[in-house]
Amino acid sequence: MSKESTRVPMESMPKILYGTAWKDARTTDLVYTAFKQGFRGVDTAAQRKHYREDLVGLGIQKACEDLRLQRSDIWIQTKFTPIKGQDPEGSIPYDPAANVADQVCSSFTNSLHNLHPGSDIPDIPSLIAKHAVRVKRNTEREEASLQDVYIDSYVLHSPLSTLQATLEAWAVMEALIDAGLVRYIGFSNVYDPEIFSVLFQQARIKPSVLQNRWHASTGHDVSLLSQLSPILSPNTFPAPVDLESPDPKGVIYQPFWTLTGNQRLLQSEPVAVLSAEKGLTPAQVVYAFVAQGMGLPGLSTCVLSGTKDYAHMKEAVQSVELEPWDDEELASLRREVYGE
């Protein structure tokens, strides 16, 4: 990837990211093919149990070379995975005996090496310390200039064993933004609205992402979604900095297991009706519903698709590029999911 445009990054998160879990030795080829089929972003994690982050980096590198993409043309999202989510007998990207801050720094450094193969990687702790002198808690944050290597969105794969440890990890993630190494940070696998509210309120830099399993076992996050929208929860979000965009931005919801965990929805009458009317597959109907914020005011979403089928990759990309549906079409699907 060329450094030519690293300081003019993609304006916002794509509407769809390619999910790289469970791809094993095929990861490089599948990531490359996903980009060939129109994806411009990936979701991965520094965790060998389910991901091959190193092979994701090689797939991105191959796609950028073949498609002549710059770093600014793509979105890279990865995660810090706490020890409880790691394979204790596998490769762990940090010393489990180290303190939380050092674990996050080591994991992040490893991610930069994996996702920017061949690039010079800075000393992360030193860079954080250098920028920390100008950052004080409870003061207005200045936008940092991006480093030559960076991650677009960095996600805490799950809360740690205690609130204090979780906030320690989050403080390092905030520092990565301060140092221009990360653009956005977020949480994953937070299903309790009270826990999410506490984490949100305690954060100096508010989360921009929540990635959760979208399934009936969690109520399809019905009790959480209102917290993510600045319209449904207008007093939660800080005032916008951009005067040209006066509305505050909420938290981008990234549901996963969207197809695999929702077979009943895929086979439902509302999906069948919209599929026939619009000439879409049932999977495309569900993806489009998610991509359009499920019809909830102010809810921003990002579809995750991890299909290994090349044709389905292209169909998934097409589903998030459709013209907006009308309120009743979205409501018919929302009733099927939420009973509203």
Image (tube, helix red, strand yellow):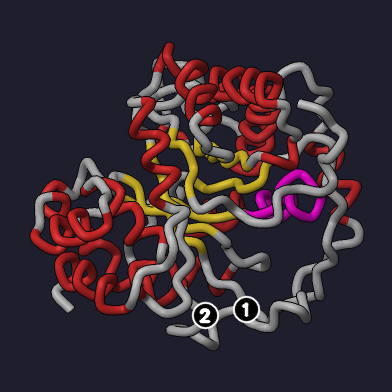
Q: Which mark is residue 230?
A: 2
Residue 76 seen by the camera: yes
Q: Quadrant of the image for the C terminus?
A: bottom left
Residue at the extreme bottom of the image, as rendered: 235
Image quarter where the N terminus lies is top right
| Callout 1 crowding tier (Cα within 10 Å): few <14, some 14–19, many ≥20 | some
Task: Give the label on residue 258, or none.
Answer: none
1 and 2 marks in contact (CB < 8 Å): yes
Residue 287 higher or lower than 99, as above or below: below
Whether residue 284 appears in magenta in the rendering, the answer is: no
Q: State whether residue 171 appears in this view.
A: no
Disc number for residue 248? 1
Residue toward you, 66 or 109: 66
Instruction: Determine whether the residue tagged by mark 2 lies in a helix, strand or loop.
Output: loop
- In this picture, residue 254 sits left or right of residue 149: left
* Percent coordinates x, y for residue 118 in the rendering: 77, 17
Residue at the spot x=25%, y=62% of the render? 220
Q: Is residue 173 magenta?
A: yes
